Image: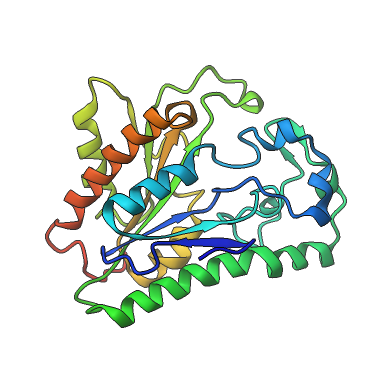
């Protein structure tokens, strides 16, 4: 199921797991004239999370889980920021000025929220509601898992190459993050795993807080370095690692309880 604003994969998935991908696409609707950017700029990490969509597709298929992917670029509106946060429509991203966003009006901002932000989030809410109606809820509470990727180097932060290969993002609820970090560290001979690195779940967590945290559903996010998943081999490798870890977590005692923190 797909439209311009979002895509739903495996809508009849049976796993007690719902995947979300906030930055799956770099698509800019034609009426926005590419926001004044070049195709090369839109293909870079400022436009989307490179490799995140394909990673989500593979995990969805492997585990038989429903997934919802945002259909427009984070530069149109960032689905993982509150619509009340001015940064949800960025004026600059990693030292790149977004020309058309510089002069957006209040009406233009509200229009993007209405046309792109809420359709995606309403789709997530609908999938969660349908799951609850179809399966034994709250005895079989769905786990909400968000998939992101990050750039190896951010020019705006003047930092050296980020050392982490993947990071687990979480905020108040450790039910998923704790076992996921532990399982990923089984690969410590190959990978460096960050705990709320290179971003903190206390800051960049709108989607999970809105759909899961506020309702007591188990949840967390993963960030995988983009250069590790921008090839078929790399994507297959990380899809397998994440899928195996999630399957084990789904069988953890009490993981499917509704619990507020």
Query: In terms of image quadrants, where is residue 191?
Result: top left
Rendered position, 70 above or below 136: above
x 35%, y 56%: residue: 172
Q: Look at the image and tell me in which quarter the C terminus lies.
A: bottom left
Rendered position, 187 above or below 16: above
* Left or right for 40, reference 108: left
* Left or right for 146, reference 138: right
Query: In terms of image quadrants, where is residue 9?
Result: bottom left
Is 246 in front, or is 10? Answer: 10
Q: Position of residue 30 (x, y in %)?
A: 79, 53
Q: Position of residue 61 (x, y in %)?
A: 33, 52
Q: Position of residue 33 (x, y in %)?
A: 83, 48
Is 85 in front, or is 167? Answer: 167
Q: Position of residue 24 (x, y in %)?
A: 54, 48
x 42%, y 31%: residue: 232
Rendered position, 94 above or below 117: above
Residue that lies at the very extreme toward the top in this rendered image: 160
């Amino acid at each position: 199921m797909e439209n311009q604003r979002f895509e739903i994969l495996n809508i009849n998935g049976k796993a007690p797991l719902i995947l979300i991908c906030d930055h799956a696409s770099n698509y800019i609707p034609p009426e926005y004239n590419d926001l004044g950017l070049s195709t090369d700029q839109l293909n870079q990490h400022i436009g989307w999370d490179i490799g995140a969509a394909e990673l989500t597709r593979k995990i969805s298929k492997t585990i038989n889980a429903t997934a919802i992917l945002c259909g427009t670029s984070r530069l149109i509106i960032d689905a993982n920021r509150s619509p009340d946060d001015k940064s949800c429509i960025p004026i600059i991203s990693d030292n790149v000025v977004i020309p058309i966003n510089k002069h957006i009006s209040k009406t233009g901002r509200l229009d993007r929220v209405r046309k792109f932000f809420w359709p995606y989030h309403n789709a997530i809410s609908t999938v969660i509601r349908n799951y609850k109606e179809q399966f034994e809820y709250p005895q079989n509470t769905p786990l909400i898992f968000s998939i992101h990727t990050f750039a190896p180097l951010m020019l705006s932060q003047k930092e050296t190459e980020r050392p982490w290969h993947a990071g687990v993002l979480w905020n108040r609820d450790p039910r998923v993050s704790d076992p996921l970090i532990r399982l990923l560290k089984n690969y410590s001979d190959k990978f460096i795993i960050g705990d709320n690195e290179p971003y903190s779940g206390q800051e960049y967590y709108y989607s999970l807080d809105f759909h899961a945290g506020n309702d007591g559903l188990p949840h967390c996010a993963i960030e995988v370095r983009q250069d590790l998943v921008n090839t078929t081999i790399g994507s297959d490798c990380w899809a397998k690692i994440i899928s195996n870890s999630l399957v084990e977590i789904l069988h953890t005692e009490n993981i499917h309880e509704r619990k507020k923190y």
